[in-house]
Image (cartoon, coloured by chain):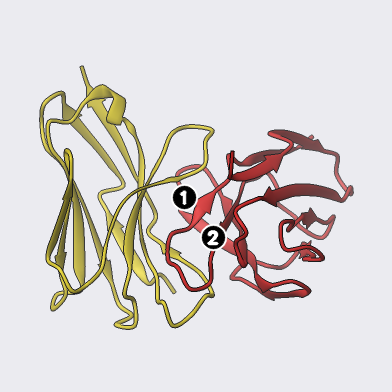
Amino acid sequence: DGGITQSPKYLFRKEGQNVTLSCEQNLNHDAMYWYRQDPGQGLRLIYYSQIVNDFQKGDIAEGYSVSREKKESFPLTVTSAQKNPTAFYLCASKMTVNTEAFFGQGTRLTVV
Amino acid sequence: QQQVKQSPQSLIVQKGGISIINCAYENTAFDYFPWYQQFPGKGPALLIAIRPDVSEKKEGRFTISFNKSAKQFSLHIMDSQPGDSATYFCAAFSSGSARQLTFGSGTQLTVLP
């Protein structure tokens, strides 16, 4: 089955900890994206990557970091610098030349 | 800067009724307008999409109406069912830029049985 897999589904973080959210796709898509969704809110872009070893900041990149060492993987690290990290995180991917974006099932991060 | 404005924020419709969600955009470079459906705890899934060279697209009970001159587009759900209860996002995309899909703020639809 082709698709995007995010893991874990639920993640709990202590204050001051860094945590990494996984996003893997086997769709051979060039571009990958990370969005943050807060209750009752739309999707806000954190980072995106159009090609391996290259990524760009989105609208709310502060306190987050990413890497793109492989085409199929785009992990997101939520650092201790992110003051309000509790949210639902969504990963998406698409072919650069195509328009349809596919989403993973999300990771719900909670700070405890 | 919000480039896609979506309304209403929430919508309650009786079973069998018509649900209408509206979006307006500013950037004339947008050339692809998808609608996504999201159930609680799940990722958004593409529902239907339209390009600005057509004024309407219909897939089953779902129809997009597009008004290029007004820079507005809307989603109509005919014969709404309780299973349609979800959050709906409009989005806009420019094929000249891979930067992002720009999303509306979402509409929480509740269809009463």
Kindly indicate whether the residue at mark 1 contacts the one at mark 2 (C-beta within 8 angstroms): yes
How would you rate the neighbour count of disc 1 (Cα within 10 Å): few for under 14, some for 14-19, many for 20 or more? few
Relative image position of residue A74 (x, y in whole percent): 73, 58
Q: Nearer the viewer, residue B103 or A62?
A: B103
The amino acid on which the numbered mark 1 sits, given as a three-letter code, is Gln
Relative image position of residue A20 (x, y in whole percent): 81, 49
Q: Where does label 1 land, which residue?
A: A41
Note the chain letter of the red one: A
Residue drawn 21% across and 72% down? B52
Residue B69 placement: quadrant: bottom left
Q: Is residue A107 above or below residue A65?
A: above
Q: Where does label 2 land, which residue?
A: A44
Position of B60 with respect to B93 (left or right) is left
Q: Nearer the viewer, residue B13 or B57?
A: B57
Separation of residues labelled 2 and 1 (CA atoms) = 9 Å
Q: Secondary structure at mark 2?
A: strand
